Amino acid sequence: MENNQEVLLKVEHLCQYFRLGHRDLKAVDDVSFEIKKGEAFGLVGESGCGKTTTGRSIIKLYDITSGNVYFKGRRIGAGIRSYKDAISNAREEAAKKLKALGAEEKGADEARKAEIRAEEQKIRQELDEVVAKNRTLIREAKQDLSEVDKQYSEELVKEIDAEYAEKISAAAGDEEKIKELKREQNARVRVAKKSKLVNEIQMIFQDPIASLDPRMTVRDIIAEGLVINGVKDKKYITDRVYEILEMVGLVREHADRYPHEFSGGQRQRIGVARSIIMNPSLIIADEPVSALDVSIQAQVINLLNDLRNQFGLTIMFIAHDLSVVKYFSDRIGVMYFGKMVELADSDELFKNPLHPYTRSLLSAIPLPDPVYEKQRVRITYNPIAEHDYSVDQPSFREIAPGHFVRCNDAEEEKYKQMLK
Amino acid sequence: MDKEVKLSVNNLKISFRTDAGKVQAVRDISFDLYKGETLAIVGESGSGKSVTSKAIMGISAVNAIHEGGEILYDGQDLVRIPEEEMHKLRGDKIAMIFQDPMSSLNPIMRIGKQITEAMLLKNKANRKEGRATFNKTLAILSEKMKKAIDLQPDKTVSHEEIDKYIKTFDDFNIQAIKLENSYNASHTAAEEMIAAIEDFLFMMEKRQKIDVVGSLSAIERNLKRIEDKYFVSTSAETLKSHLADLEKAIREEKSKIKFSDSIKKLFGVGASMNEAAPETIEAIKALEKTAQGLLDRTPYNFFRIGYYVYKHPGSDLSQMSAEEANEMALQYLNEDYMNSFIALVKIAVQYSFDTTIENKKNAVSTIQQAIDFYKAGQFTSQEAEAWCKKVNESVLAAIDPLAVIKDTVAFTLGGALEREIQKYFFYLKNNPKEEERFARQTAKREALIAKGKNVDWKVIPKSIIEPETQIESIVSVLKRVMDRFSADVAAADKFDVDKRCVEIVDFLKGKASQVVYVLTKRVAKEKAIKLMDEVGIPEARLRYRQYPFEFSGGMRQRIVIAIALSDNPDILICDEPTTALDVTIQAQILELINKLKREHNLSIIFITHDLGVVANMADRIAVMYAGKIVEYGTAEEVFYNPQHPYTWALLSSMPDLDTNERLDAIPGTPPNMIYPPVGDAFAERSRYAMKIDYELQPPMFQVSPTHFAATWLLHPNAPKVEIPKIITDRIQRMKERGGSHGE
């Protein structure tokens, strides 16, 4: 990829917890990464490690627990649990301190009492500050979330208005044409008013059978997004559907068939078509090939690659098949139990895997090479034996430029040594 | 290398009847499976690999038609034997692991019960069957003896004497069974006691809620059940002292809970939890050790001792050590009874063998006539059935009743033949509706062609199966029996009477002792836990009581493997066992299957579409496409020297870690198997297709003694074709890597 450093999607400390009885199930816990425009970002990990949840949280299928998601510089997702936690923690701490001071005050002399009162005052003030700060953050987050779509659609409307103002002035005198243009403008403005920023992110699902409605024709399935967005021009919709169908390697005749009449690879193509009709800038592909046969897998991967080159799409590719991810992605993030443990360029990751989990994952990839396979030694990952986090807590750190690993100080030293 | 062939599939053809016509799922495939090897079948979905495996298991779908060919296992044709015979093989000799572990487990049954279910049922069936076979065989033996003696001029032994011999054999076997039964009861009690102790110690260690007094009493009950004098013999005193210890421990535990018991009960808490005294645990551990010692001792041979005790009622050999008693009883048995009995058996066996050889000669000629009759065609169903009956009678008469291993091919001939004939007449029947449709469609098609239009559809044939092929199938059934019999007749002078005698006596002994071996639930549980440990499930004792949904995907697949292994099968069919699993779990499961294969010397048929998995597992690989095997060879040959364009396409369409160039996707989709292509099925999607590929099916060309491929490219007249660069590059890389590993 060319040197394009524009950040399209930025995920900051994303947490997604699910309630599980009295406890929280931390499906995604403090994950941060950036996806640059035009790149393919791979996310790997075993099932249940939270990679799909990450994808779904970004596209707002879930309300995130805490953290921020920025898309094109706008905040599209924000969780407020961390701020609330901060407030309640501060309150608890202050209460504890005040209680201790209160106990001391009883037996103290006058001078000490004054001191204590001053201290109490200070603690209360600090608490108020913390609460106020976090409350502002919460308010901001809520406001951002409620206004992001409005701002986006207003901008779109403005753009359209500007575009048509020019056209209309150019066509001055021709009443018929101006009328036509105005009608067109109104239609587009109506659509623009309904658009949401999140619509620029689209998703491709794993199972091409389950994700297509069996009672809708391919045309309906593909056009559904447009219809929901308020497009009413039948001819425009049909033309668009045909265009997209040909783009993904199907033919026009397929538009009036039902999903069950297609093979697995073709169904997945329909899924791809449905996602690109909305002109997205980011596609989240959630295991798009794992339900397919080997030969069909290659067709779908090639299709995604072509689309990416053609439209400069950005793709977030979630999968557990490492050889496919390696082939497809520019950068890869490895997740383990809701945490991102390593993030690097794909070549770098496969050349210098640092985190023990990444190494065990890489050692488990089956390759079509019998001699190598029979000598292969699988590394097992045992988090309890590998890490000692009792004293020094780990965090996500940059070991080399662009190569991030979750580690603590001692491990950071070790990994740096390994890279040398 | 000469290897034992476990299973061989020859020219198998399977189709499915559907509304749209006949789908030819498997078209004429053949392969052999050797003992202790893994054969991988690779192909896209719809290539017929699962259909083949299901045919081997005898679980084909209802609309499947078996059009020809055979699956031979242990001399039997698995596609033709009746369901009752298949029952004996399925799960017992041939087991299967399916793709989705959740759908092959019962969601409302505990894991433990699912593993032990088959063991318990099988044990029960075995016991019933054992006694019946014993009686039947003994009766036949006596009858043959009498007949053989009658033929002798001097008649050395009278009929009464033979009856006496047989009765003695029967009686002392019953005596032996009685002794062994009581021995086994104690043996089982000891095993159960150990199981109970293990359970108890485990619960204590895991600090689970446990009723100490209740558990100890259960152990005590088991201990009291160990009373057989042969079993305890020398250790009776030790056991008694253990019992005293245990009783004392129970008293103490009881006294401990006396005060708090009523209060605890009031609050609904189980009495005394996790409070066993250290002395109690010590005592129990000592008891377990003693019991284990008893179990590990050389067992008595009750077949011999039974005779001694039968002759000397009231005598007691329990004070002797097992070895001495066995030796002494054997000598006594041989001198007093066995030698003369064996001599009699010998006469009977020889007689029975000679008569069957005569019968076999007759049967061969009858079958020959029958084959001629069927081949001529033009027969009514009454005629055909009369011949079927005649052949069956002569064949059944030619089976040696004293052969230990029954010739199942001959045994199942009647049923197989009858079904084939019925099938023939069923397909022969004219269906007026179908005829009409056929005529209509043909007319339409011809009219279109006459107009000069391009017709891309074909008329569905009116009958599903050709009568000629069905007759061939009938003949092949008969032929196999005939070949078998001719071979037997030819090898008649190599017959070893002594060996057969020993075999038949051993067989009787085995059948008698089948009755004795009782598998109780508790012992089955211990076996299941051992099995769960073997397949790598941690804390098996705790997980034994869990339900399938409490397990993760990998663990569930392990459970399925444990169930498949619970009856010690010969052949394990794995139908995409890791497709639903993650990379790391997949690697674990594959390692497990490989390990079990080595330990149990299993033969494995491994079905998958993932070539990466295959490289790890397979000794040999068969690549299937459109119901045919297109390439067949050892793993090294198929990966390093692929010959068929389809294998190339498969290899080049999957990226490996060093692939950077565009993937070589296979264009199009697999052909519609209602109208299978005339020539090479892969021609339409192949870049290397030549004209002949569209016209004629390529035969199997031999590349090396173990490597075959069905492609015209291997024909000497074919143009030289380069293997795609993506593959040559990869092979080059692999060789470099492999070379560095080799050094």
Image (spheres, coloured by chain):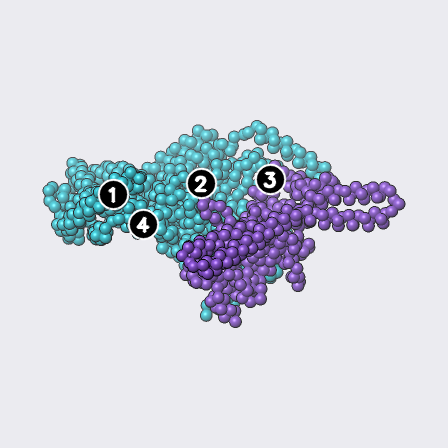
Label 4 or label 2, whichever lies nearer to me, is 4
Instruction: Please provide percent x and percent y for residue B552.
Output: 44, 48
Residue at 52% x, 40% y is B15
Task: Determine contact: label 3, label 1, CB under 8 Å.
Answer: no
Q: CA distance from mark 4 to mark 1?
A: 20 Å
Residue at 74% x, 44% y is A189
Q: CA distance from mark 2 to mark 3?
A: 32 Å
In primary-sequence order, the first of circles 4 and 1 is: 4
In depth, the one of B327 and B282 nearer the eye is B282
Q: CA distance from mark 1 to mark 2?
A: 60 Å
Q: Are marks 3 and 4 on the same chain?
A: no
Amino acid of disc 4: Arg
Say which chain is purple: A
Relative to B271, residue B702 above or below: below
Crowding at dot 1, Cα within 10 Å, few <14 / some 14-19 / many 20+, comes out as: few
In primary-sequence order, the first of circles 1 and 2 is: 2
Amino acid of disc 1: Ser
Instruction: Please provide percent x and percent y for residue B686.
Output: 61, 53
Instruction: Give the structural element (helix, strand or loop) at label 2.
Output: loop
Residue B59: numbered disc: 2
Q: Are marks 2 and 3 on the same chain?
A: no
